[in-house]
Amino acid sequence: RKEVEQDPGPFNVPEGATVAFNCTYSNSASQSFFWYRQDCRKEPKLLMSVYSSGNEDGRFTAQLNRASQYISLLIRDSKLSDSATYLCVVRGGSQGNLIFGKGTKLSVKP
Amino acid sequence: DAGVIQSPRHEVTEMGQEVTLRCKPISGHDYLFWYRQTMMRGLELLIYFNNNVPIDDSGMPEDRFSAKMPNASFSTLKIQPSEPRDSAVYFCASSFKGSYEQYFGPGTRLTVT
């Protein structure tokens, strides 16, 4: 089983749609969770951390279910500029141990 | 403020040649990471340093790969000899202890023919 698994997509949605991405992780000892965004031919950038209680940043909502080892990202009112690949990231026991999923590609169409 | 700087941005070389990738982390960051990204395998951690000391190199694919960090502002990743399967985008990232956010450089797109 891969350490971090994501549906690769692509998700093709119209502007204004709500879209949800899911991610599962295999290591129950994982301590921290993140979503990174990567634009085409660019570097990954931190989008948001994911907290146990769930957290929201504008149109973006992240949820964590430790019992199911499941992370989600919800994007409301999709914009063209949201088109990118979204990487689910899990941290193990050390500063350096970030495990990246392969990403889910989102394409928002006019 | 300057972000993580990588050079070269693109490298095309022939199989068997030595390749050296360079990275300058963000000033004040004490962790430096080297990643490789391919379509097949996604983003993989190769090695990371803390205060210039290699901490975990278990991701380095084989002896052809080596990395150094002679000081806090410079690191290199060397492939010798290079092979076509090394073709990928190589990212360098840095972070500051206490923050789990890693800041990535723009990457080096390596093509080995």
Image: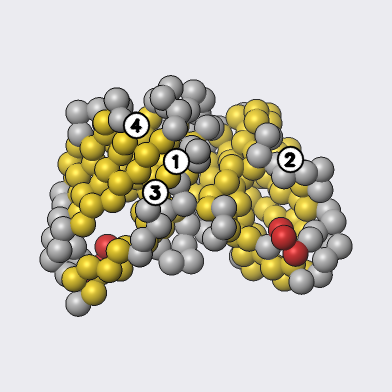
Quick one: label 3 or label 4, which is nearer the N terminus? 3
Residue B34: assigned label: none
Q: Which residue is mark 1?
A: A4
Q: Are marks 3 and 4 in contact (CB under 8 Å)?
A: no
Q: Earlier in the sequence, mark 1 or mark 4?
A: 1
Q: Residues within 10 Å of mark 1 (few under 14, many from 20)?
A: many
What kind of residue is marked 3? Gln
Identified at 26% across, 47% down, the residue is A73
The answer as to whether the residues below labels 1 and 4 share one chain is yes
Give the amino acid at mark 2: Lys
Q: Which tag is nearer the camera, tag 3 or tag 2?
A: 3
Residue B8 location (% of width, % of height): 66, 63
B54 sits to left or right of A82: right
Q: Secondary structure at mark 2?
A: strand
Residue picked out by circle 2: B68
Identify the chain of the residue marked 1, using the numbered disc in the image: A
Residue matched to label 4: A69
Q: CB under 8 Å between callouts 1 and 2?
A: no
Distance between the alpha carbons at the discs numbered 3 and 1: 7 Å
Check disc 2: other Cα within 10 Å, few if <14, some if 14-19, many if 20+: some
Residue at 42% across / 44% down in the picture?
A5
- The kind of secondary structure element at disc 4 is loop
Decide if residue B8 is in sight here: no
Above or below B99: residue A57: below
Q: Residues within 10 Å of mark 3 (few under 14, many from 20)?
A: many
Residue drawn at x 61%, y 55% is: B90
Q: Which label sits in the foreground, 1 or 2?
A: 1
Q: Left or right: B6 with respect to B84?
A: left
Q: Secondary structure at mark 1?
A: strand
